[in-house]
Amino acid sequence: MDTKIFYFSGTGNSLAVARDLASNIKGKVELVNIAKEIKKDKIEIKEGCIGIIYPVYFEGTPLIVSRFIDKIQANNGSYFFGIATYGGMAAGAIRHLSNKFKSRGLKLSSGFVIQMPGNYTPMYDVKSNDFQEKVFAKEKEKIAKIANIVNKREEHHLEKGSFVTNLIFTKIGHNIKSPKFPNQDKHFSSDEKCSSCGTCIKICPVNNIKLENGKPEWQHNCEQCFACFHWCPEKAIQCGSKTAKRGRYHHPEIELKDMLIKK
Ligand SMILES: Cc1cc2nc3c(=O)[nH]c(=O)nc-3n(C[C@H](O)[C@H](O)[C@H](O)COP(=O)(O)O)c2cc1C
Ligand code: SF4
Ligand code: SF4
């Protein structure tokens, strides 16, 4: 039974987790970017071992991941597992994914959360190198445990978060905020450092940026992945008043070429 891992990633954390897991999985493993796969009308999944790896957005699943699951054509002959990467609190992100699976008549057999450096820079600055090294070391340990479970196709308890955090942050908080995600790009702007290089256009997973007179304009179909913000080589994209003084982040093992959607 081959393994296929579908991932979504803005700053490379979830891609790095997908790669680390792939190197611990027995047999053939294929990594597939959800941002590319979602362009298909139907996503047919043959029986196998299927993983979905994604970042937590406001204690829930990214909208693009939910749309991806809506398009899946599969049956329960597959072993499905999920991994949510998060910065500080995953709350009910895996419960959210599991419920999405249930709504399609599918079952998530195991689901895990992995802490990585947070990338929501409007709220906090980039984490120190020391912090990053500690979470990366823990991530590698957890990946080894997850690989052991996935290799055995084990039914495992889902890391669903407590009832209270799920209720407050995921069921109420995420469900109020997520319909507003597409329009939250209204908070992005580019400053005088913009060199019109076009990287933000090529990295956006949903083609949400156009250059007008050499400057990016956001089209209000945003996933809130923050790829444009973090990968701009000039640090010219701001989001609110605090980010001009803050750093930019991407996972140290992931390069721009690994993330580009358009050539
Ligand atoms: C819009 C947005 C919302 C986020 N919300 C949360 C959150 O609710 N809880 C959390 O722990 N981390 C949150 N994060 C941090 C990311 O989940 C975390 O950094 C993740 O590993 C990023 O993965 P990526 O590099 O694959 O995009 C958020 C990040 C963004 C951009
Ligand atoms: S990536 Fe940055 S510098 Fe390049 S076009 Fe976009 S905003 Fe301008
Ligand atoms: S506009 Fe920026 S934050 Fe929004 S989906 Fe595109 S790359 Fe991600």
Image (tube, rainbow, N blue to C red):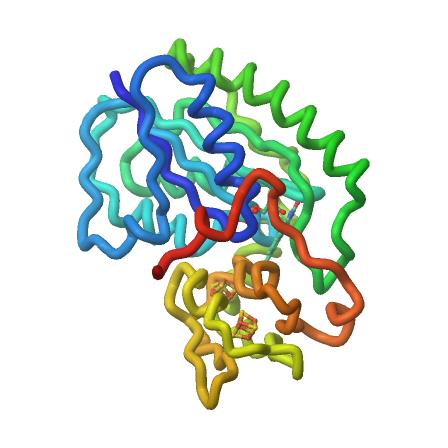
Which sits in the foreground, 29 or 42?
A: 29
Left or right: residue 244 compared with residue 150: right
Q: Residue at x 28, y 49 (%)?
A: 37
Task: Using the image, determine if residue 162 lies above or below residue 205.
Answer: above
Task: Using the image, determine if residue 125 lies above or below residue 84.
Answer: below
Position in image of residue 17 (x %, y %):
52, 33
Q: Quadrant of residue 162?
A: top right
**In this view, which residue lies farthest toward the bottom?**
213
Q: Residue at x 52, y 47 (%)?
A: 255
Position in image of residue 38 (x %, y %):
29, 52
Q: Which image quarter holds the N terminus?
A: top left
Q: Number of marks in the image?
A: 0
Task: Using the image, determine if residue 30 lies above or below residue 179.
Answer: above
Task: Using the image, determine if residue 53 lies above or below residue 56.
Answer: above
Position in image of residue 209 (x %, y %):
44, 74
Left or right: residue 92 compared with residue 18: right
Q: Residue at x 36, y 47 (%)?
A: 34
Which sits in the foreground, 221 or 30?
A: 30
Q: Which image quarter holds the C terminus?
A: bottom left
Dividing the image into four quarters, tell me where ligand 2 lies: bottom right
Which sits in the foreground, 114 or 210?
A: 210
Q: Residue at x 32, y 49 (%)?
A: 68
